[in-house]
Image: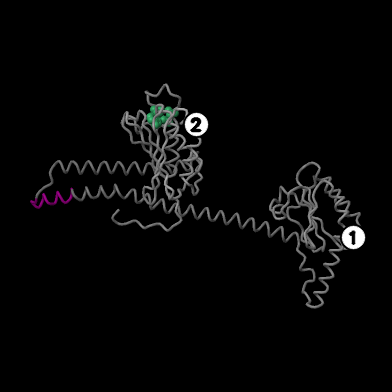
Amino acid sequence: MEALPQQPIRSEAPLQLLLFVDKRPGSSERIRQVRVCLKDLPSEYPYELQIVDVSEQPHLAEYFKLVATPSLIKIHPEPRQTLAGTNLVAQLKDWWSRWQRSVEDYLADLAAQSDSKPEPNGNSEIRSIAQSSEVLRLSDEIFRLQREKEELQAQLQFKDQLIAMLAHDLRNPLTAVSLALETLEIGSSLKESGGSRLKPELIAQLVRHARTQTKALDRMITDILQAARERNAELRIQPQETDLGTLCLEAIDHLQARITAKAQCLSTDIPSDLPMVYADHERVKQVIVNLLDNAIKYTPERGTISIAILHRTTQKVQVSICDNGPGIPPENQQHIFEDQFRLQRDAAKDGYGIGLALCRRVVQAHYGQIWVDSESDQGSCFHFTLPVYRLLPIVPLSPTH
Ligand code: ADP
């Protein structure tokens, strides 16, 4: 097939034709036939035939609302006319004399207009294919750049929001530590000035409290660093404005047959006024499916399972998936999120011990948290949080938090 021009050449011929083809083997032959036919037809006016490969210039095909190839379109003089089908040459012959007349009328009109109001450039009204093609290409490009800009703006805004959220979260344990230290300091200065001293139990309690909070701080910072690594590593997250309620319903739909097969009772609490979250649709759905799948798997027949979504703070939404199954012993509640960790108790059940590890990676990559509340034989509640998607200004941190 001959090389087709990417950018049509500027032309001012009064009769302008576009021949749309695709990459099928017969296309070159069709182009040749149309060209030969045009050469043979009696032509009183200059014309231009432009060949367009639809796969290379899809925006043109869209603009001309093309439904089939090959198609021959008379784009000037107006009105536009489209011939389509395999017998293009026959149709072209049929229409040719009328197209010639339309050029004649157009030129006569133009002459009459320029008699009454001379134009600096007599042919300037002829819409060049080159110009329309270029305009279309540029508008496609503008549209693409616009979308890119909006996405980047949303990402930047989300980053600001995250920083505010993380600073807020970090500030709580930090405030607790500094309060404990201040109390200890006041206690020791009172002692030096002969005032009443702090009781040893209170001192021990304050030190313990400060230590726990420091550990919490350390864990949060580790989580943040890990999340940043995950986002850069293999786990590609493509966050967008996401409706968590819909995701939960899709996950339930996916597993409904298994719930029914075990005669389990599923209840949902999905408020209708939930804010959107900023999350990767598929990944988060995978998390919900994994947690729900575990609840079904580890809960006996006729057991009960629930899914609830809670707008926890202005910045976070929490999903909780609970069951009344065997629960998780306290000493294993952290370990179950590790890679390939399974409870001995469940060795006979299908599984590889990777589901919860993946859930943790996905949630952390969204700067969210995942944890389990459980007591043996009392069932388990798996919770995870995701950041709210907001395009509103960020509320400044209050100095007391
Ligand atoms: P898998 O289910 O493939 O073993 P997971 O990583 O999903 O792997 O879970 C790790 C372990 O945590 C399971 O083997 C099971 O012992 C325990 N577990 C997970 N979900 C529940 C649940 N809802 N109830 C009781 N135990 C659970």
Up-down relation of residue 299 to residue 130 (above or below): above
- Quarter of the image for the N terminus: give it: top right
Residue 333 sits in which quadrant? top left
Q: Position of residue 224 (x, y in %)?
A: 39, 44
Up-down relation of residue 254 to residue 213 (above or below): above
SS of the residue at dot 1? loop
Instruction: Quickly name the residue at label 2.
Output: 257
- Left/right placement of residue 282 relative to residue 101 reads left
Q: Name the residue rendered at 84%, 64% in the picture.
A: 103
Mark 2: which amino acid? Ala
Q: Name the residue rendered at 70%, 55% in the picture.
A: 63
C-alpha gap between disc 1 and disc 2: 71 Å
Answer with mark 1 or mark 2, whichever residue precedes in sequence: 1
Q: Which residues are magenta?
A: 184-195
Q: Name the residue rendered at 37%, 26% in the picture.
A: 343
Picture disc at residue 73: none
Up-down relation of residue 259 to residue 236 (above or below): above
Mark 1: which amino acid? Ser
Residue 339 sits in which quadrant? top left
Q: How many C-alpha atoms fall within 10 Å of the one at disc 1: few (<14), some, or many (≥20)?
A: few
Q: Position of residue 12 (x, y in %)?
A: 80, 64
Find out if the beta carbon at label 2 lies less than 8 Å from the nearest ligand 1 atom: no
* Residue 341 in view in this figure: no
- Left/right placement of residue 393 relative to residue 171 reads right
Q: Quadrant of ligand 1?
A: top left
Q: Position of residue 155 (x, y in %)?
A: 48, 52
Instruction: Quickly name the residue at label 1.
Output: 43
Q: As drawn, which residue projects farthest toward the left?
A: 194
Q: Position of residue 353 (x, y in %)?
A: 43, 28
Up-down relation of residue 106 to residue 269 (above or below): below
Magenta region includes residue 187:
yes
Q: How many C-alpha atoms fall within 10 Å of the one at disc 2: few (<14), some, or many (≥20)?
A: few
